[in-house]
Image (cartoon, helix red, strand yellow):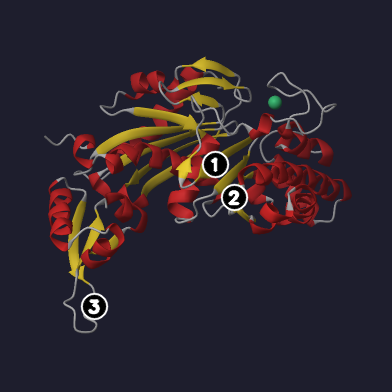
Amino acid sequence: MLEKLHLSGSASRSELTTTTGLNRSTIAALVGELGELGLVEERGTTPAAGPGRPSPMVHTRPQGAVALAIEFIVDSLGVATVGLGGHVYNLVRIARPTDRFSPAETAQDVVKLAGPLLDALPPDHRLVGVGAAVAGTTRRADGVVTFAPNLGWRDVPLAALLEEELCLPVPVSVANEADLGALAEHRRARPGTDHLLYISGEVGIGCGAIIDGRPLLGAAGYAGEAGHTLIKPDGRPCRCGARGCWETEAGEAALLRLAGVPSGAGGIETVAERAAAGDEPALRALDEVGRWLGLGIGNLVNLFNPDVVVLGGVYERLFARLEPSMTEAVRARALASSGEMAAIVRSGLGSDAALLGAAELALSEVLADPAAATGAP
Ligand SMILES: [Zn+2]
């Protein structure tokens, strides 16, 4: 019931009865219990319509469970405070200084960004967890980033490092940024879409999957490394050590190289500006990268039969420019049966999908066991 309220923000008692299949007295008791935990409150009633009595409205109390969300990607660092119901209190993002790549220095930057955000929360808030999204393979069980080739990290105990630097009395969970982008799209932007792929284009390509309404994680949390699947056997060397990976042909670096734009901050915007001005190399680069992107998506569509493929990160920003050649390549690669039913769309959460997903990860415990996660007896 709390999850239902978290996704929709509010619902009447009679709607909760219908959607959960529980009877009215059970719903009343649960609302009372969650109210005592400070997680929900009743305010107002549904408009009186027809012969039935107006039903009390139940709302989430965002301050009742707040998550601190962090996102580590190659070119930026994002931090947000998010309450129950998806209420974003504050969100800041800074361009990532390229000379501060070490995990310890990055954790110190997080502390500096998070401090003012935590101070600005309502006085009666309850912090329940910290969630971190990382562009790399991450072991869910202990929050170790095993390999983040584009950050240059290997076997970094990120959860432990953040616990030590932040000194907050709550658990720290760490997961792959594309997995969390998928989680956020599923929970916040497209509830009810139970077969969803999220493709994040940053320096690398990440992929997160929701299958049958659940995140696909693999044995340790490493599933979905589509960026390092083979797409061109004689292709360029990849930072993972292999050759011809999807991200070497369809990632940001390939786009900049083909467009003749130096890599670094603002490169993608430069490509977009040049394309808008009709610059031939920029237009050709977008066409070529769109084609490689579409070929990879076609493979994924054949594997997973998704309802929707959501494009995030760089692909969200360049969606309109990439779409023609991408769509053509998907059509050429995917089997007609699954290709026809997969809608390919831009992220509904813009560049913040993974950051909001990190908040969702940190709020998961409260949704699963409200009493235990809020420390109730
Ligand atoms: Zn690779």
Q: Residue at x 52, y 35 (%)?
A: 177
Q: Residue at x 72, y 41 (%)?
A: 296
Seen in the image, is 145 located left or right of residue 65? right
SS at mark 3 in the image: loop
- Identity of the residue furthest to the top in this view: 155
Q: Residue at x 46, y 17 (%)?
A: 104
Three-letter code, disc 1: Ala
**Res 149 quadrant in image:** top right
Dot 2: within a 10 Å radius of its alpha carbon, few (fewer than 14), some, or many (20 or more) residues?
Answer: many
Three-letter code, disc 2: Pro
Q: Give how far across and how far down residue 53 sits, in percent.
A: 16, 77
SS at mark 2 in the image: loop
Residue 92 appears anywhere in the view: no
Q: Is mark 2 within 8 Å of ligand 1?
A: no
Disc 1 to disc 2, C-alpha distance: 9 Å
Disc 3 to disc 2, C-alpha distance: 39 Å
Seen in the image, is 150 located left or right of residue 363? right
Q: Is mark 3 within 8 Å of ligand 1?
A: no
Q: Give how far across and how far down residue 116 sits, in percent.
A: 34, 37
Q: Give how far across and how far down residue 120 sits, in percent.
A: 30, 43
**Residue at the disc numbered 3:** 47
Three-letter code, disc 3: Pro
**Residue at the disc numbered 2:** 306
Query: How many marks are shown on the rendered structure?
Result: 3
**Residue at the disc numbered 1:** 209
Earlier along the polypeptide chain: callout 3 or callout 2? Answer: 3
In this view of the protein, which residue sits in the foreground, 300 or 40? 300
Which of pointers 1 and 3 indicates the residue nearer the eye?
A: 1
